[in-house]
Image (tube, grey):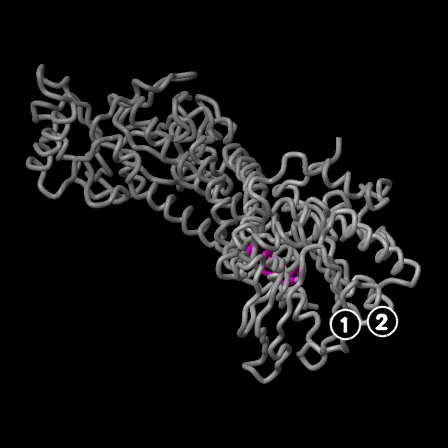
Amino acid sequence: MSEAQLQVRHLRKSYDEGRIEALRGVDLAIEAGDFVSISGASGSGKSTLLHLLGGLDTPTSGEVLFRGAQLGLTIDLDAFRSKRVGFIFQAFHLMPTLRVLENVQVPMLALSPCPANRAERAEALLREMGLQDRLRQYPNELSAGERQRVAIARALANEPEILLADEPTGNLDSVNSARIMEILTGIQKARGMTLIVVTHENEIAHSAARRIHIRDGRIEP
Amino acid sequence: MAAQLSFAWFAWKNLWRRRLRTVLTLGGIAMAIGAFVGLVGFSSSFEHEWLRMYLSSGTDIAVVQQTFLNTSMNESAGETLKALPAVRQATPMILNLMDLTPEVNALAYGWKADSYEFDSLTLKAGRRFQDGQPEVMLGDLLAASLKKSAGDTLEIQGAVFTVSGIYHGGSALEAGAVIMPLDQMQKLGSLEGKVTAFHVRLRPAPVGEAPEHYLARTEAQIEAALPGLRAIPAAERAGNNQIVQLAHAAAWGTSGIALLIGILGIANTMAMSVFERTREIGILRALGWKRWRVLVLIEMEAAVLGLVGGVLGIVAGWGSLRILSALPQTASIVSASFPLLLLAEALGIAVLAGLAAGLIPAWRGAHLSPVEALRHE
């Protein structure tokens, strides 16, 4: 049996000195190239799970493994986030002071050494997103759909193996939502990447090859 | 070619976002560095001019009482000094600061008419004064400020003096000074028989004796011959006389306070900036930026504030020195020369001030939890 790309064992996460339990013992394995949706009600723990899978946060107990190596123990979390995963957020989280082309280069500045051709790489990604006419715009000059496409280009900047999207269509209308999901699934297929999408929209959840539903911090069978 | 993003550009854009705050912070640090450059430059220039005066006159040793400003040495000590074998010439002098007009004050020297210190001055008009006569000689800078020529009269503290000559001195302390007969100055200040110091020229060092050793040996001889007095090498005296030390202390004290205010200004700006950008810092951390990279970015912003503020401050300080060297009230004690070391010091202090001010906000920003920072409203 092949080793899972991402695996979580007995994962627990609590806040406020244990008074709030966001995750109550989650076990999960995700294979490379999977398209997984994580759905659930608000406060069910789905975003917390995504943050732990992406090395944004550390569990209270249990472990997250990337190809069998434990995050935070044998794998440095910063290095994991910069090289292995790309994040896409509901609120886009672009840098307001930077132009579109510069925003896509921000993750590349996390690498040592920084790629010398980062501007060219960023431009190529933005062309792929159909934003070749928006390179010199600032985020506030773009539509919501365009901003999310910039965020996707940024997530791909360091050629990660895993894309983690937290409600990527939460701030978009239906047309743009469909477009973004089309782009994400297209990237996942074309590049063979793992795509994990947290969503509360049934349509998106059902478009995934594998659906995970969380309720009260536990994965429903 | 597409625009490449660099750390420095990123830092600059963050500062440029809050232009008014950045400009105000720059104004604060520029004022602090300007005060440092102006005040420390003033005191350094003062010391430099003092040294030039000693060097140009060929004075090797200054013999003083406990304090330089205290005109309490007996003039008769000069005979003991002259009797020492190493002493070629010993000339008494009085130094004071006088208000010549409500606008113009100047250093005033009381010299003997035969003082060797006249050798370094160039007479431009008139003649040297005579001992016992109510006469003065004016440095060309002071004469221009007072609009006086040789033959004119000048009232000093109620007494009328004739300007016997105008001279040019190599140092601003001389060019902006008034020199009068020692006895006239003693009379003016009710200091009959008293002097501020003796300036001493030594005979050449004996063959085979190192100059430093010769100087030290002679100092010891003078102090042994005149108990209670101090013999100090002229070069050392230029830096440690009380007027210069007072100027240095005032300069460093005042500019230190100004620098502290400047540092607090940068610290406030950086703390505000980090607080406002908490979510952005969270994004950087989410994108894999290590803590030290976030710290470097914020420190770079603080250093840029310090550097740019420092450059502006140097320009302001240099301008103030130029103005001081042109004002009649201060022209006699400051020159417009601008030591390069001071420039380097000012820039170094500005950048260090920026880095120090940014350290705590940077540390705080770097240690934000990515998830907490992303949730920040």
Label whose residue precedes the other's in the sequence (1 or 2): 1
Quadrant of the image occupied by residue B86: top left
Per the model, the C-alpha gap separating discs 1 and 2 is 8 Å
In the rendered structure, the residue with mark 2 lies on which chain? A
Q: Which residues are magenta?
A: B265-278
Percent coordinates x, y for residue B85 in the rendering: 7, 23
Asked whether the viewer can see residue B272, the reply is no
- Amino acid type indicated by mark 2: Asn
- Amino acid type indicated by mark 1: Ser
Percent coordinates x, y for residue B268 in the rendering: 58, 59
Are the two marked residues, 1 and 2, in contact with CB atoms closer than 8 angstroms? yes
Q: Secondary structure at mark 2?
A: helix
On screen, residue B355 versus residue B96, left or right, reads: right
Residue at x 51% of width, y 30% of height: B145
Q: Residues within 10 Å of mark 1 (few under 14, many from 20)?
A: many
Quadrant of the image occupied by residue B96: top left
Magenta segment, prevailing SS (helix, strand or loop): helix
Q: Secondary structure at mark 1?
A: strand
In the rendered structure, the residue with mark 1 lies on which chain? A
Closer to the camera in the image, A94 or A219: A219
Q: Which residue is mark 1?
A: A39
* Residue B213 part of the magenta segment: no
